[in-house]
Image (cartoon, helix red, strand yellow):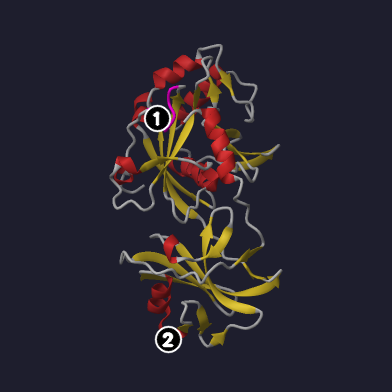
Amino acid sequence: MKKNTLIILMVAVVAVIGIAAAVMMMTGDGNDDTKDGKIYSVTLEVAQEDGAYKEYAATGMNVKDILTKTLGDDIVLKSNGNVQSYKNKENTVNESWIVFRWQSLKGWVPAKDTDLRDDSTLVLEYAKKTTNNGKTEYVQPKFSISNEVYFFIQIPNMSEIEKIAKDPNSKPDDKSEGKKLTTSERYDVLMGWLEKAGLTKSDIEGGIWVNGSGTNANEALVNALKSTWFPSSEVEVVEDKGVLNYKLDGETVHGHLMSKDMFGWFTDFLGWADTQLNNGDWTYWSQYTYNPNAKTLDDTKQWTYNNLTLGKYDLGKYRYFGLVLQTTTEKQTGDGAEIVMQTPSEIPEGL
């Protein structure tokens, strides 16, 4: 997809998604029937009388199944699947038992069967509720969560990037902290990060997997860089005129936009910003997600070009992302240049 077309599309798609509020609205009963028979393995956190949470390793085909198998006689459900009581504590006019799951940016939302994924976290909370304009709202749990995410990072053609860096007509985007840098200088920063990480050109051309955790994918990405490549570095987060910059030992390793409609849009990553060439093409970090509903983790066709900014993806569903520094051309209307990406099945053991 061409860069200017992508910007228009992303603005249209993500503008409807808001940042988390202090309260949330309950939609539906949170228990849709599942038909594929899959058993999910999740973590269930249950709010206790003293304000603490008790953790369970839980399994089940849907939310109702998970609750009944895990909590047994302590839980009583209504016919529609909603919780009626837990340990004889009944719902009241002002409070109800609600099952929540974490969704990036929105915060805690009602858990639905269609959103269940392995390794996700559910929270059973006795939530206070209010009615505003005829709609019931529930206060979100105070339980904090951080999702683990895997990133495949690749620069499939380093010689192309070097050529672009030497082109005096190429124009780096001006939203990043290093907006005064030339393309050549950005290339030097990029190579500096790769050298510090101990990566050769061959390594990055083949692609590297990293993993980290966070409340959104951008935060998880920086944590992945630190834990995998720069474990001794100190992370500092600095806001600058609508851009969130993540610094390692004082140097910005990643920056992204903070606005509601474009949260997570890369201003730069490993020193490289979106760069327009003199023919109108763009060289930038193209982003992909691996289909969360894929039946296998070794199918390259399950990689999909992102239609949202990275920060908008729900980490309760998506666990695998691809970041590829490549050039899109005027003739391309889809996913950019053809590349060979590894699949999650190739993630090294122990990562």
Q: Nearer the viewer, residue 48 or 32?
A: 32
Q: Nearer the viewer, residue 22 or 133?
A: 133
Counting from the top left corner in percent of width and height, residue 57 is at: 39, 69
Looking at the rendering, the stretch of residues picked out in magenta corresponds to: 331-337
The image quarter in which residue 130 lies: bottom right
**Residue denoted by label 2:** 73
The disc, 1 or 2, on the residue closer to the chain's N-terminal end is 2
Quarter residue 38 falls in: bottom left
* 289 on left or right of 123: left
Picture layout, residue 292 above or below residue 157:
below
Neighbourhood count class around disc 2 (C-alpha, 10 Å): few under 14, some 14–19, many 20 upward: few
Q: Amino acid at mark 2?
A: Asp
Amino acid type, mark 1: Leu
Horizontal side, residue 262 vs residue 147: left or right: right
Q: Secondary structure at mark 1?
A: loop
Q: Residue at x 59, y 78 (%)?
A: 96
Give the percent coordinates (x, y) of residue 342. 32, 38
Residue 88, position as x, y percentages in the image = 52, 88
Does 336 sit left or right of 242 as displayed?
left
Residue at 44%, 49% in the rendered image: 149
Residue 224 showing in the rendered view:
yes
Q: Is residue 58 above or below residue 242?
A: below
Work out whether residue 308 or residue 159 is closer to the camera in this orientation and state it: 308
| 14, above or below 78, in the image | above
To which residue does mark 1 refer?
A: 199
**Prevalent SS, magenta region:** loop
Badge 2 element: helix
Circle 1 or circle 2, nearest the eye: 2
Q: Is residue 345 above or below residue 176?
A: below
Instruction: Residue at 29% x, 50% y: name it.
Output: 296
Residue 348: horizontal and vertical position, in percent? 31, 44
CA gap between label 1 and label 2 equals: 55 Å
